[in-house]
Image (cartoon, rainbow, N blue to C red):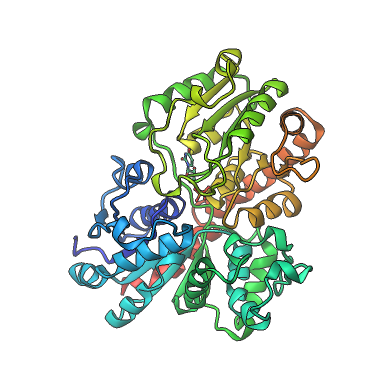
Amino acid sequence: VEHSKPCVAMISSPGVGHVTPLLELAKRLVTHHGFSVTFLAIATTEPSPAQDDLLDSPTMPPYLHVRRLPTVDVSAVVPPDALLVTRLCLIVQESVKSLKSALVDLGRPKALIIDIFCTEAHDVSRELGIPSYTFFTTSAAMLAFCLYLPTLDREVDRSIEFAELNQPIEVPGCRSILPEDLLDQAKNRKIEEFSRLLYHLDRLTLSAGIFLNSWEALEPVPFKALRENSFYLNMRVPEIFPIGPVMKENEPETLKQSDRDCLEWLNKQPERSVLLISLGSGGTLTCEQITEIAWGLELSQQRFIWVVRRPVDATRSGTYFKAGSNDDDPRTYLPEGFLDRTRGVGIVMPSWIAQGAVIGHPSTGAFLTHCGWNSAIESIAKGVPMIAWPLYAEQRTNAVLLTEELGVAVKVRASGENRVFGREEIAQTVRLVMEGEEGRVMRAKVGELMDSAAKASEPGGPSEVTLASACKGWKS
Ligand code: UDP
């Protein structure tokens, strides 16, 4: 570790959706703010190729070091039936045991930056006298809800679920949330997923400050609520630092051959003519739903790039921990003849794609997304309208923001009670976004947000100024 530069340490729970923005923040700190950053990566016995690609990137700037903490044996600490958040929390808990010695080794960094599932780290940093900050990697609206959740939990009798209140959840100063759009983990307060989440949310206020991958013009209402309630619900809210958009640049040297081929193909397509379909790191669908999407794409007669994964029935966040793993041959689960019939019109990419590079390509016209916050930010920053297909975690809440509040996405219109979206509805939605008037209106709106994203992040713009103000104290 260089002694000439002040050092900052980071730790993030496993998962591309959290590691990506924290690493990007690390890059900004080393390239624009004169820090040396050590990213303490949580390592497990489970392979996660996409995450490893991020951590071992050949384009890591000087003064950004990735150091893996001792490997956590997942089978020893996580029961096989553990759900997403519980699993994350158990892995983090185990890994954080080695945090103290890592920080001491680094010569006590000037600051520690963590993600929401690493709040045990606050105790370690307090002991060592290091200020710890949280990078909350989803929206400001979700932050306001999460700060409110412990209060809501105290106020509503535990024998009743929030969904049974039969009324929207009123988040102070913010848009209320319909029970069906609630964060998954808040839907059942009787299970461990909720208590684990609540534990970390309760500890958000231990942060010396909270970074957000957002900016004022994108979410004026929640930012106002957070600002005006510096004692939001009787809590001292840590200072909020909006530093968005924070997103990964897909440098050419990090692209795989399959990605290069894909971009090559995109180069030959008309402007804004291709629909990208990608459901984040964890998104999987049932066999029935994959079949309907395939037929829907054919019926829509639009060009597409579809990131497909082996169908997993009745699970959610299926590939979160092994994102980017090689998958089965799509021929085994796509409708027979689909690949032949759509040759030249669409590309099927098994498992993983350099999403940022594809969204930013001029031939990309729309993005069917699971509404993970990183994906939403990437799409907005590149001015691409979306089809919202939320699956799990806080994705439904994000989808409401994108569709109803910002008007930059539409949902597929479901007919009847069926949880499966049918091919006709899919085809119709795809066409209206790619070719219809509604698509034109959304594209105009997302174009405005794209401009505001560019303004926020330009040199001297509010996100850069905010970040500089956050780290001013770390240099002394
Ligand atoms: N991503 C990617 N290729 C894929 C799927 C996802 O590069 O095939 C990236 C995407 O660009 C985003 C991140 O992985 O930066 C996923 O984060 P997000 O918050 O959208 O969703 P999550 O995976 O956390 O559900």
Q: Position of residue 230 (x, y in %)?
A: 60, 80
Residue toward you, 16 or 443: 16
Q: In the image, is 447 to the left or to the right of 54?
A: right
Camera-nearest residue between 61 and 308? 308
Residue 272: where, in percent of width, then height? 64, 27
Which quadrant would residue 10 be assigned to in this image? bottom left
Q: Which residue is found at the position 48% from the left and 75% from the top? A: 199
Looking at the rendered image, the quarter that the N terminus falls into is bottom left
Q: Is residue 436 left or right of residue 242?
A: right
Q: Is residue 250 above or below residue 314?
A: above
User: With 203 as the anchor, is 289 left or right in this view?
Assistant: right
> Is there any visible trace of residue 229 in the rendered image?
no
Q: Is residue 443 above or below residue 77?
A: above
> Residue at horizontal 53%, vertical 22%?
347
Up/down of 158 relative to 26, above or below: below
Choose between 234 and 178: the one closer to the eye.
178
Location of residue 362 by image quarter:
top right
Q: Position of residue 251 (x, y in %)?
A: 39, 36
